[in-house]
Image: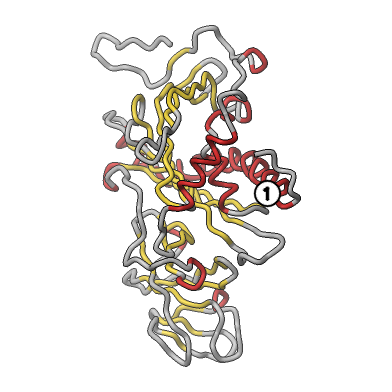
Amino acid sequence: MNGLPGPSGWRPPLRRRRGGRPNWAAQPSTWRAARPALIADALKRASARPSGNWFVVAASREVRPGGPPFGRTVGGAEVVLWRTAAGELHAGPGICPHLGAPLRDSRVVCGTLVCHWHGLALDGGPFAGWEPYPAYDDGVLVWVRLDAVGGEEPTRRPVVPRRPAAGGALDAVCTAEGRCEPQDVVANRLDPWHGAWFHPYSFVDLTVVRAPRGEDDDAFVVDVSFRVTRRCVVPVRAEFTAPGPRTVVMRIAEGEGAGSVVETHATPLTGGADERPRTAVIEAVVAASDRPGFALARAAAPALRPLVRRTAARLWRDDLAYAERRWQLRASGRFPG
């Protein structure tokens, strides 16, 4: 890659790819390196890590201070969240304890959730059999603790991956849904070898330079170039880790945007006994850079977030097809792994 610094020492973020446009069919095959047992072992280790019964349910911005309630079904349990005008977060069952109205369709009046069927008011505390859920806002994502769904030893807070400092980062959150289980989403992310084959519009020159060797060495390390145009790329070294059973984190270790992360959270929408499971992929991109011009990107965040979300949504259209196919084969007993 070229991209030598100019007279002032400034180095452009883009590199002109040597060899011109990539040839998809000419790239080295990766199927031998992408050993099913290796991916399965990484998935098994991730699945055994505790979550404290915490589930990502939304982007922080989706639950607005003084705004309407936000609803999502997690593990078959209806959940409703809302904020007071001061930003205080509340969460609890999404079924009205009176006659079962969907509280996600109700209104927030002066910080109180008021059922639109008969006016039952909930201030976030226990009332008439309605018990609040522990909720946590990490500044990018909102989490809810559902002990009946998780079935683990509960913890006071979720395990939030290390991120760039909020004041110097740009974040965007994309949500997609597919017919699969969380493990199928996690398995997709623990297979970095498919990147340049399955997503040639985004990734080229991908090499897995190190695969996990066990619990104490559990990261996939990848050299890859992000495509910006047909010939211009941004080369980086990235690490993939799974800090929990439903979370995979990609962190840029070297190159442009070092320290930036992409967090992929797989939240089950249906219960464990459902024959047609559905999972929400809630993915947070938290980007940072030491370039002076990055402050302009942060200032333009409202305009840039939709672009980041569209890019992530395109990737997940493909990756959910991967995850759904994996679930279909597992459900039918034909999965080769």
Q: Is residue 38 above or below residue 67?
A: above
Name the spot of residue 311 as percent of width and height, x first.
55, 38
Name the spot of residue 116 as percent of width and height, x first.
57, 84
Tag 1: amino acid: Trp
Residue drawn at 45 percent across, 29 percent down: 211
Name the spot of residue 50 as percent of width and height, x first.
40, 57
- The answer to which of 86 and 315 lies nearer the viewer is 315
* Residue placed furthest toward the top: 19
Occupied quadrant, residue 109: bottom left
- The answer to which of 150 and 264 lies nearer the viewer is 150
Residue drawn at 61 percent across, 67 percent down: 271
Element at badge 1? helix
Name the spot of residue 20 as percent of width and height, x first.
55, 9
- The answer to which of 81 and 189 lies nearer the viewer is 189
Residue drawn at 74 percent across, 44 percent down: 334
Residue drawn at 55 percent across, 41 percent down: 40
Disc 1 designates what residue? 327
